[in-house]
Amino acid sequence: MGSGVCSRRQRRIFQCLLLVTVVCGIMYGGMISYEMHKQLKRTEAMALKYQQHQESLSAQLQVVYEHRSRLEKSLQKERLEHKKAKEGKKNDLRSITTLEVCLH
């Protein structure tokens, strides 16, 4: 035998095992990369879906706020008209009462 630590045969076996390990490592890394890419695509699709849903809800909420604002303005207008009508009726009633007092 020679002065080397391992023989040619052992070195050859070691090189084959190292090659198999490197190839398996590369294949495993490729599989992990592929799975991560798939998961990223799913996550991006879900994020887009949720973003569109949020935009839709925001638009609906804006419509609700605008409608509420119009209703509040309408309610204020109705209250003012009601108050004026009530005051007008009170004035009419006072006028009628005054006329009745004057006629008697």
Image (cartoon, rainbow, N blue to C red):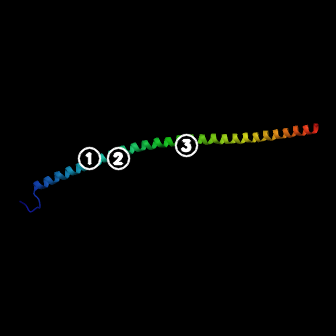
Mark number, residue 58 = 3
Is 78 on the left or on the right of 65, as rendered? right
**Residue 11 vs residue 88, the one in the foreground:** 88
Tell which circle, 2 or 3, labels the residue nearer the N-terminal end.
2
Point out the residue furthest to the left here.
Answer: 1
Q: Residue 101 at what x, y percent from top left?
A: 91, 39
**Going 45% across and 44% down the picture, which residue do you hit?**
47
Quarter of the image for the C terminus: give it: top right
Tell which circle, 3 or 1, labels the residue nearer the N-terminal end.
1
Q: Residues within 10 Å of mark 3 (few under 14, many from 20)?
A: few
Measured in 3D between alpha carbons, the distance from the residue under mark 2 to the one under mark 3, in whole angstroms, is 32 Å
Q: In front of the other: label 2 or label 3? A: 3
Secondary-structure class at tag 2? helix
Q: Residues within 10 Å of mark 2 (few under 14, many from 20)?
A: few
Measured in 3D between alpha carbons, the distance from the residue under mark 3 to the one under mark 1, in whole angstroms, is 46 Å
- Looking at the rendered structure, the kind of residue marked 3 is Ser
Quarter of the image for the N terminus: give it: bottom left
Q: Are marks 2 and 3 in contact (CB under 8 Å)?
A: no
Secondary-structure class at tag 3? helix
**Residue 1 vs residue 30, the one in the foreground:** 30
Is 46 on the left or on the right of 18, as rendered? right
- Looking at the rendered structure, the kind of residue marked 2 is Met
Identify residue for label 2: 36
Q: Residue 46 at what x, y percent from top left?
A: 43, 42
- Looking at the rendered structure, the kind of residue marked 1 is Met
Mark number, residue 27 = 1
Secondary-structure class at tag 1? helix
**Residue 95 vs residue 5, the one in the foreground:** 95
Q: Residue 50 at what x, y percent from top left?
A: 47, 43
